[in-house]
Image (cartoon, coloured by chain):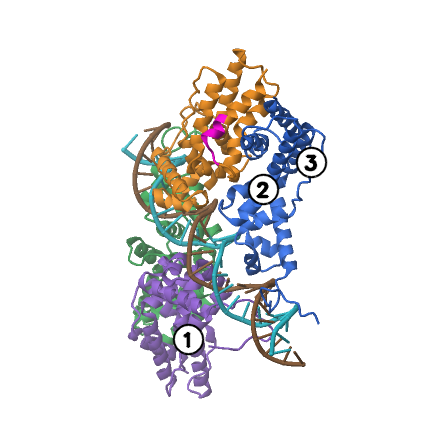
Chain colours: A green, B purple, C blue, D orange, E brown, F cyan
Amino acid sequence: MSQEQSPSTPRRGRPPSEVARRKALAAAHDILMQEGFGRLSIEAVAQRSGVGKPTIYRHWANAGELAMAALMAGVEEMAASPGDTLRASLRHQLRNLVRAFATTRGRQIAMALAAADPGSEFTRAFRNRVILSSREEGRRLLARAADRCEIAPPADIEVLLDMIYGPLFYRLLVGHQPLSETLADEIAELSLRALAR
Amino acid sequence: MSQEQSPSTPRRGRPPSEVARRKALAAAHDILMQEGFGRLSIEAVAQRSGVGKPTIYRHWANAGELAMAALMAGVEEMAASPGDTLRASLRHQLRNLVRAFATTRGRQIAMALAAADPGSEFTRAFRNRVILSSREEGRRLLARAADRCEIAPPADIEVLLDMIYGPLFYRLLVGHQPLSETLADEIAELSLRALAR
Amino acid sequence: MSQEQSPSTPRRGRPPSEVARRKALAAAHDILMQEGFGRLSIEAVAQRSGVGKPTIYRHWANAGELAMAALMAGVEEMAASPGDTLRASLRHQLRNLVRAFATTRGRQIAMALAAADPGSEFTRAFRNRVILSSREEGRRLLARAADRCEIAPPADIEVLLDMIYGPLFYRLLVGHQPLSETLADEIAELSLRALAR
Amino acid sequence: MSQEQSPSTPRRGRPPSEVARRKALAAAHDILMQEGFGRLSIEAVAQRSGVGKPTIYRHWANAGELAMAALMAGVEEMAASPGDTLRASLRHQLRNLVRAFATTRGRQIAMALAAADPGSEFTRAFRNRVILSSREEGRRLLARAADRCEIAPPADIEVLLDMIYGPLFYRLLVGHQPLSETLADEIAELSLRALAR
DNA sequence: ATATAAACGAGACGGTACGTCCCGTCTTTCG
DNA sequence: CGAAAGACGGGACGTACCGTCTCGTTTATAT
C-alpha cells in the first residue's frame, strides 16, 4: 500500500494504480469544493490530477459516479450517538448532521444525488452510506428507546424517520431556511411530542 | 393574456413573440417528460420547436431556467384545501401533493431545483411558486386552526412546516420509499399528535 | 406655388434621408480603416452610425456593396496626368497611384474587390471607377503619345495596359514587394522600352 | 521535461490521423469547386467529410487557412519550362499559367489570398508555393538567358518580373479581360522588347 | 388642417456558422 | 502488460451577424 519512494528518484518505475485512483479522487474532491458539481468533468479531473482519462473511466462510469465517490470518501461513518435518553441522543445526532451538511460539501452531496442515475448500483451505495446511514441510526435509537419503554413503539416508523431526517434535505435543497442547531433541537422536540404516550 | 402595458415603458421595436415563447416552453416540457432533465438542451428545444436559439436565450439564461419555466407553466396554483378540521384539510392537501409529485414531472422538478443556481431570481420564483406554495398554504391552515382553538399555537412553526413537507421531497430525491397516500395520511396524523395540547 | 413634380413619381410620403445614407457610409468607412474589411458587418455599421438596419439594406444589398460604396466615396476622380512627354505623364500618374494604394484603403479596396460578386452591377461600377479608371487614363496617354508620333501605335494595347497597371495590384495583393516610387518609375521606363520603335 | 527527446520522434500519445486530414482537405476542395470560397465553412467541411470540427481546428486556424491548404494540395510544382530560347520557355510557362488560372480554382486562389491574414505563416507558405513559385521560375529563366548572352542583364529584375506575372492576377481579380493564350504570348513578346539591347 | 403614406430607429425573429468545451473511445509510446 | 498522453468523431455550448419582419415615430406631401 505505502510505496515509499526515494525523493531523489521520484518517477522511477510505474506508479501503482491505487495511487492514480486516489489522485483522481482528490482532484475531484478539490474541484467539487472549489468550483462545484457543475464544473466537475472527467477532463478537468484528468488535467488536474495528472491521471489519464482512460484510467479514470476504468474506475468510474461517468462524472456523477466520480463525484459521489469523492464525496463518499470524505464521510466518516457517523459514530453511534451517545446519550442516556432518546432526546439527548437524537439531539446529538441531528446537531452533528446539521453541522455536516451546512457546508459546501453538503450542497454538493444533494446535487450529486439529484443528478445521479437513480437505478445505478453506485447511486444506491452512495445513498445508503451518505444519506440513509443517519436514518438507520435513528431507527436504532428509536428501537432502543422503545425497548427501554421510554416511548411507545411508533405505529409507522418509516414516516416518522422521514419527518425527522427529511427536513434537513428539504432545507438543504430548497434553501428557504438555514440549517441551524435550532432546527436540530426543535426536530428532536417535536418528534418526541408525536411519540408521547 | 394580460394586455396591460407598463406605463413607464414606451416599448419601441418589434415586441417579443408570445407564440415563440410558448412553442419553446412546450418543446422543453415534452423533452423533460419524454427524455428527462439531463437531455434537455437548448439545441434540442430549438430544433424541436422551430424557434431559433438566440430567441430562446433572449428569454432564458440557460437550460436550467428553461426547464424551470416549463415545469412552472404546468403547475396550477394549488387551490385552498377544503375541510372542516385541520386534520381533514391537511390530509387533503398532502394527498394532492403526493399525487402531483409521484410523477415524472415531480422527479424533474426535484432535479431542476437541485441543478439550479441557488441565487438566481428565476430559481427563487420557481421555488416559491412550485415548492414553497404548498408550505405557505400549510401555514395558513395551521393559523386558521389555531384561531379556531383547534390546536395550540405551535412554538416553532417553521420547523413544523418542514417536518410536514420535507418528507415528500426527501422521498422524492432519495427514493428509499415511495410517495404514497399512506405517507400523506401518516404525516397529517403525526403532525397533529405533535401539536396536541 | 411650385407645382413642379418629378415626372416619373409623385413622391408621396417621407423621402429617404440623405443624412442617414451619409452616416452609414461614414461609419462603414471608419470601420474599414480601423478594423478592416472582415469586421465590416451591417450590424456594426447600424450600431456605430445610429442608422437602422433596414435603412441600410434599403441602400445596399449586403456588406460588400456597402464597403465598395464607402471606398468609392473617398476616391476623387484621378485628374488627367500632366506632362509634356509620355514618360513624364506616366511617371506622374503611376506615382500618384502608388501613393493612393500604399495605404490601408488600398488593401481594403483589393479585398472588397476580391470578395465581391463579380457579376453584380455594383461591382462593375466599383471596378470601373476605382480600379479601371487609371487604366483608361493610361489608354488616353498612350493614344495621345502615338498621335504626337512619340511612340509607335502599340500592337496589343490591352496587354500593354495590363503590364503597366497589373504590377500595382499584384504587389498589393501578394505583398512580396512594397508599393514604392521606384516601382512607378521603373514601370514607366520598361513600358517605354517595350514601345521603342 | 529536461529530458527532451530528439526532435525527430518525440511524439507521445496518439498521432494525428493522416486520413482525417486528407478527408477534410478533399471535402474543402469539393466545396471550393462546387460552391465557392464564400460558402466554405468549417461546419460544412466537418459535415461533408465526417471529420469532427475540433479535429479540423487542430490542423487549421480558420476557414481561410483550410481553403489555402486545399488549394495548395492540388498544385503540382510547376516543372521547369523547357525551350531553347527565352522567348520559347517564357511563352510555354505563361501559357501553362494562363491555363491553370483560367479555372474555378484560379478564382478561388485569388479570393483566398485576398481574404487571408497577410502576416500569417500559412499565408506566406501559400503565397510562395502557389503565387510566387512561377515568378521565381521566371527569375531563373531570365538569369539563364543573360548567361547565354541572349539578353542584357535587366536593371530592375523585380519590377520586370512583376510586369510579367502581375497582369495575370490583375485580369483574374478584376476580370476586365479574359485570361487567354494571346495574353501569354503578348506578355512574352513585350517583355523581350523591353529587354532588347 | 388633416389625413395618408413612406421612411425612420429600434429590436425580435428564424437561421447559419462560429470557435470552444467536454464527452467517451481509440491508438501509440513508454516504463 | 498498465498507465500517460493525446487525437479522434461527436454534440452542445453561448455568441455574432445574417437578412426579414413588425412595431411606434417622424416627416412630407396631397387632400
The spot of residue A44 in percent (x, y) is: 43, 45
Q: Which amino acid does label 2 sit on?
A: Ile
Q: What element carries label 2?
A: helix
Q: Name the residue under label 2.
A: C109
Magenta region: which residues? D178-185
Pick whichever, A48 or E5, lies toward us: E5
Tell me: residue A75, above or below residue B137.
above
Pick whichever, C172 or A141, lies toward us: C172
Q: Is residue D180 magenta?
A: yes
Going by the image, does C165 lie left or right of A71? right
User: Residue C81: which disc?
Assistant: 3
The spot of residue D185 in percent (x, y) is: 48, 26
Q: Earlier in the sequence, mark 3 or mark 2?
A: 3
The spot of residue B153 in percent (x, y) is: 46, 82
Q: What residue type is labelled 1?
A: Ser
Q: Name the residue under label 1.
A: B134
Q: How far apart are marks 3 and 2 (CA)?
A: 22 Å
The answer to the question of whether label 3 and label 2 lie on touching residues, with beta carbons closer than 8 A, is: no
Q: Please, which chain is the residue tagged with disc 1 on?
A: B
